[in-house]
Amino acid sequence: MEIEMTQRAGVLCELPQVLCDLGVDVATVFRGSGVDPSEINPNTRVPFNRLLNLLHGAEQATNCPHLGLLIGLRFTFDIHGPIGQLMLSAATVRDAFSDFVIWQPGYSSGAIVYLNRYGDEYAIGYGSIAASSPGSKVLYDAIIGVGVQMLRKMTNGAVKPVEIHFSHLPPERPSDYARLLKVPVRYNQHRTCLILDEAGMRTPLPSADSAARRDILAGIRKVAFQTPPDVSTRTRQAIRRVMLIAKPTLSAVAFQMGTHPRTLERRLSKEGQTFGIMRDAVRFSAAKELLELTDIPVSDIASHLWYASPGVFSSAFRRLSGTTPSAWRAATPGIKPSV
């Protein structure tokens, strides 16, 4: 039986205030969402699809393309709870972001946070494994806002990203993004992330406190995963994480999870799942997102998702959707078909 993917509200609990600031009626936006705007707080768990639909409705109601940034830039470490305090106690920026990656799975069963090194640069980013939706763009923008604020607050503004990547097309007014982010931005990328250099990652945190860190970590370990995520959820997250750096084979995903491939298959079988079907679903979700939010060529999407060829990708996509990647994109408002 599938467990519904959920997201801890976190900074998204700031949506009602942002709507007020923009002069939009909060009750109207939240009507039918299943979320009470008067009760939402950082720890509220919201079904992922419901959250994406709410964010999409909010963007439409405000007519504000940079709504996600306005939400994310309201981030404080208090919103992030014990994990936020753990990050502040870390010795360096890299250690703090490592804390984020290690403990974030408890905050979301429908997405991942990753920290990957590419040569002399690092990408700290966010990727969804839930169904795509127009609200995905708002969510990704909010996450970027969170990442930028994390850096500003951890280092008192001493460290900035080298650049920021968005996995969506340029907004109508790129100047709004430039004004709010104050760093170079690249749109139409295959991932949404901050790019930091080695010097930035090695920067010491003024708030580093090894003694407090031990106490905070002990507290987190006491309560973390009191209801452990099922193997299927952990596998989806591992597949999405591996896809960013390598072909998501059974062996690669099992290694990411610290288990043997046969053990992973056996545990998935007990939950009524198979690795192949789960990998297809995660790839399909990522493919839909790139087709809907970008105009990256279909052949490049096939490569990013580690398909053997564009033809293999098209066949797999048609099997799951009943149509081709190009036809799917053509049916998406605002996206022109790309070769």
Image (cartoon, helix red, strand yellow):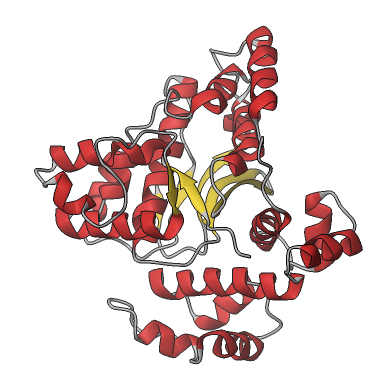
Residue that appears at 45% across and 25% down: 77
> Against 82, is 167 above or below?
below
Residue 292's quadrant in the figure?
Answer: bottom left
> Against 110, is 100 above or below?
above
Task: Please identify the residue farthest to the front as the structure is shown.
Answer: 1
Residue that appears at 41% across and 32% down: 149
Task: Please identify the residue farthest to the left as the structure is shown.
Answer: 23
The reply, left or right, for residue 105 in relation to residue 268 is: left
Res. 21 in view: yes
Residue 47's quadrant in the figure?
Answer: bottom left
Q: Position of residue 124 (x, y in %)?
A: 57, 44
Residue 311's quadrant in the figure?
Answer: bottom right
Exactly how many numbered labels are in the figure? 0
Front-lying residue, 202 or 31: 31
Task: Please identify the residue farthest to the top as the structure is shown.
Answer: 211
Q: Position of residue 52 (x, y in %)?
A: 37, 58
Q: Position of residue 94 (x, y in %)?
A: 63, 31
Res. 183 in view: no
Residue that appears at 23% across and 48% down: 176
The reply, left or right, for residue 55 in relation to residue 200 is: left
User: Which quadrant holds the N terminus?
Assistant: bottom right
Q: Position of residue 261 (x, y in %)?
A: 88, 62
> Against 243, is 80 above or below?
above
